[in-house]
Image (spheres, rainbow, N blue to C red):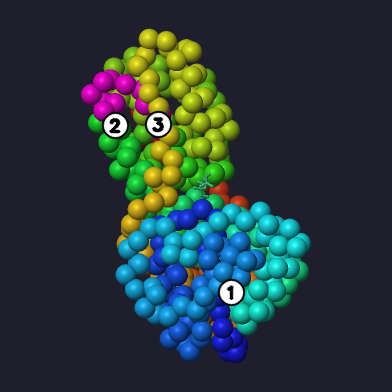
Amino acid sequence: MSNIRKIGILTSGGDSPGMNAAIRAVVRTGIYHGMEVYGIRRGYQGMIEGDIFRMQTTDVSNIIQRGGTILKTARSKEFMTASGMEKAYTQLAVHGIEGLVLIGGDGTFRGAVAFFDKYTIPAVGMPGTIDKDLAGTDFTIGFDTAVNTAVSAIDKIRDTAEAHDRIFIVELMGRDAGYIALNSGISCGAEDILIPETITDIEEVLCRIDAGERRKKTVQLIVVAEGDDYGGAKEVHESILARFPDLDVRSCVLGHIQRGGSPTYADRVLASRLGHAAVNALRAGTTQVMAGIVNNEVVFTPFDKVVKGSMPISEDMLDMIRVLSV
Ligand code: F6P
């Protein structure tokens, strides 16, 4: 067991539903084991500015069901500079923080890799992002909620699309990853799903639309990931109209609605489990790793492997979409 007594916790990058549940788990597990837990506001930026305060178990009461993050979050450009990192390290020393728990996504772990390359302080990460674009975990905190939000929105769009016999394109978030689009599209029975992990051939997309029209489909719903290689909803919309000017086409960019809202039970359990595991990892001296869930077991993956690892989409899923989306 390590003798870390004071730990800091921060949320960084885009917020994701379940971050509050993660904070709650870390604070309560730390205090349970006799640690002092310090909240760092606005991610790495708050670390640079010394925006750090002691947390008690009651500070995390009544937050497990809330979206956003009580610690606030930011994407700090300054942290990626040598002087920013030095300031951040100095502030940790000033506050006597001996260990860190970092909750965030790809940018957070890239920041961690750069920081810990230079400075030594034990740290454990937790995957907090709706994008699910990190290796070392089957799920990230917020992904399940974001997909459920998207599914509920697309179901509503399908109602109006059907009423008007329209083609609808819905653009979903995910940065360079297509997991939100893929899973939402499957769940909503989308006629087509365009994701960055596969090359989008617009001619094939247009052919499928044409075939759908010939079969007198009343709705054709296309889900496109914001990071798709062909473009987003706007580009797909324009291509469809250019080829089929008489079709009634509408598009919708779902946007930040996907980041908000009360976390699903799955995200609350995931966040609680990983928060508990992260503190125990710090205590055990298992550090500079991200806690994730693989095959329903907690696993730890070094920070650099989290950002550089590959997360391929299984072929059977892609085949299934082709079969079911007729
Ligand atoms: O990483 C989460 C995410 O919501 C991405 O899906 C999206 O591309 C990005 O953040 C949007 O960032 P911002 O809120 O800074 O516009």
Task: Give the alpha-carbon distance from disc 1 to disc 2, as whole Å.
Answer: 45 Å
User: Is 166 included in the stretch rendered in magenta?
Assistant: yes
Disc 1 target residue: 100
For the image, the number of numbered tags is: 3
Q: Residue at x 58, y 65 (%)?
A: 46
Closer-to-camera residue (73/228): 73
- Farthest residue to the top: give it: 246
Task: Of the two numbered discs 2 and 3 on the same chain, state the one appearing first in sequence.
Answer: 2
Q: Which kind of residue does numbered mark 2 sit on?
A: Arg
For discs 1 and 2, the disc positioned in front in the rendered view? 1
Q: Secondary structure at mark 3?
A: strand
Disc 3 target residue: 252
Task: Give the quadrant of residue 3.
Answer: bottom right
Q: Name the quarter where the N terminus is drawn.
A: bottom right
Instruction: Confirm whether residue 212 shows in the render.
Output: yes
Q: Which kind of residue does numbered mark 3 sit on?
A: Cys
User: Is 109 included in the stretch rendered in magenta?
Assistant: no
Q: Which kind of residue does numbered mark 1 sit on?
A: Leu
Disc 2 target residue: 158
Task: Of the two numbered discs 1 and 2 on the same chain, state the one appearing first in sequence.
Answer: 1
Check the image and report above or below for 166 versus 28: above
Task: Give the quadrant of residue 240.
Answer: top left
Callout 2: CB less than 8 Å from ligand 1: no
Q: Residue at x 56, y 29 (%)?
A: 230
Q: Residues in magenta?
A: 160-170
Check the image and report above or below for 276 versus 294: below
Task: Give the alpha-carbon distance from disc 3 to disc 1, as whole Å.
Answer: 40 Å
- Image coords of residue 8 (percent x, y): 56, 75
Q: Residues within 10 Å of mark 3 (few under 14, many from 20)?
A: some
Q: Secondary structure at mark 2?
A: helix
Q: Residues within 10 Å of mark 2 (few under 14, many from 20)?
A: many
